[in-house]
Image: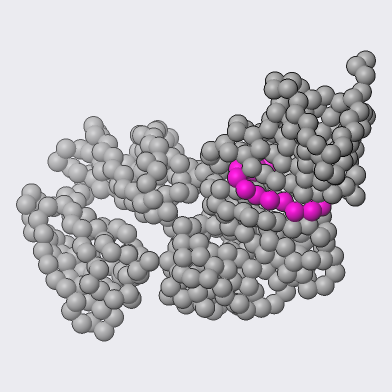
Amino acid sequence: MRKGLLIILFLGSFLLAKAQVFYSEDTVSVVAGTTIFLPDTVELTTSSGLYNNGIVIANSQWNDNGESDTEDKGDLTFSGSTLQEIKGNGNKNYYNVTFNNTTAGTQSLTLNDSALNIYGTATLTDGIIGNGTGTAIFQDGSAVAETSDASFFSGEISKIGADSFVFPIGASTVYRPATIKIISGSQTITANYLLSNPDVFGISKAAGIDNVSKLEYWTIVGATSADIALSWNSLTSGSITAPVDLVVVGAYPADTWHSFNGKWHQGTAASGNVTNDSTIGDWSLFTLGSLGPSNFLPTDALVWSVRGNSSNQSAHVKWLVQNQSTFKSYRIERSEDLVNWQLVDYKNSNQLPNAEYDLDDFGLKSKVYYYKLFAETLQGEWKDYGIQKVDLSKAAVQISLFLNPANSFVQIEVSNAKPHAKSTFTIYDLKGKLVAKSSFNGSSRWVNLDFMVDGLYFIRVDSNKESKVFEVLKLTK
């Protein structure tokens, strides 16, 4: 058997040769005032152990199966430039840990095997840390420094102790922390942020809550006696115009969103946080809610329509996406009997913040068809946007309006109208006062709303003896 390697380093620095694996079956000690650079893979066996009171800088894979001391006060830095794995079944007790991996994308470092235990300060300089089969546990008295959209934990992490703590969590490339303020007693709290729709849990809405986000939520487990502060960000939280109306809402799966009311609000319309005004009990799902309509939290990131054209036996599928950062691809399916479905097309996201997609499905031989639209989230889940029916034998004029709520524009679309037919639209405020009126030829018209103040309006569209009225919420970001 290869003899174990014992390193006792005093003041100074030590650099292992490049492309040399660091392998040890015995204790590895780094004393105060010493820096050790490890440019290649680190292998610590079950008979080994890291006792670090100096500085260790690891630039490659880290496999720790040994023992380490919770009393050591050293610094360990993961500073690779490619995907870096932190694994091994040792106890991984480290004091100060810095994550500074420059790999671009949604994951720069991966935690596998036993938990990474942090007793001092975790400094998140660069690189997103994802969970494989492992996780990170912040021990009593630990803290977090820096953090940004460039560096956070993507996945569940835990905190042990009685002190307040900011969970440095997020998803994709969005940092969305949750803060826990302990009211009494030591607790073990596990938190995660998901850029996904909590509606999958079948949660209703309690009286007094105007709207609840359907684009993001947090899971927070174990905080039985604590306050929670949730963050908001205009990238994922919708249009926030009245932060004072924001509340933390919590629920069990298949239950009801309950409001804790907002105790403190900090920040601007672009970003900030809101803290609840009562302890959260043992609910596990949390997101942002609004007590009034001024804050329009994301109720859906995608709207779509299908319009039939009997003149050329085709169907036109159109969808508009806001906050497209939540989706990476789309697929359209078609059926004649609601039982047998076939793929019509598959499209990757064009990566624009807001996007419009069109698809023409030609060569239809039957009279009635059904269409489904699915959007794939960044987590690989396919979200079903329901079924739309096309009856080519009744392809009358159909009127649609897109981008509601609206910032600056809405789009009116008229299908199956006669060539060069004239359509008109009229805008009224809530008191019935005429705001604007105009006409257009063709199948589509963009309408500029910049001259209007924020609020609710009615837009009536008339075309070829067909009329339709839309209620539109105008909100300026």
Location of the C terminus (image quadrant): bottom left
**Residue 267 visible in the snapshot:** yes
Q: Say left or right for 126 vs 410.
A: right
Image location (x, y in percent) of residue 236 = 48, 58
Q: Does the magenta stretch include residue 469?
A: no
Report the front residue among 150 and 403. 150
Report the front residue among 193 and 25. 25
What residue appears at the point 74 percent right and 33 percent down from the top-left corner?
Answer: 37
**Which residue of the protein is positioned furthest toward the left in this rendering?**
420
Q: Quadrant of residue 315?
A: top left
Q: Quadrant of residue 127?
A: top right
What residue appears at the point 68 percent right and 51 percent down from the top-left corner?
Answer: 123
**Which residue of the protein is positioned furthest toward the bottom in this rendering?**
431
Seen in the picture, residue 18 relative to 341 is either above or below; the reply is above
What residue appears at the point 62 percent right and 59 percent down from the top-left corner?
Answer: 177
What colouring does the structure picture have?
A: one colour
Q: In which quarter of the image is residue 451?
A: bottom left
User: Which range is magenta?
Assistant: 114-131
What residue appears at the point 76 percent right and 22 percent down from the top-left corner?
Answer: 21
Q: Is residue 121 magenta?
A: yes
Secondary structure character of the magenta stretch overall: strand
Q: Say left or right for 398 vs 204.
A: left
Image location (x, y in percent) of residue 36 = 78, 34
Image location (x, y in percent) of residue 337 = 38, 39
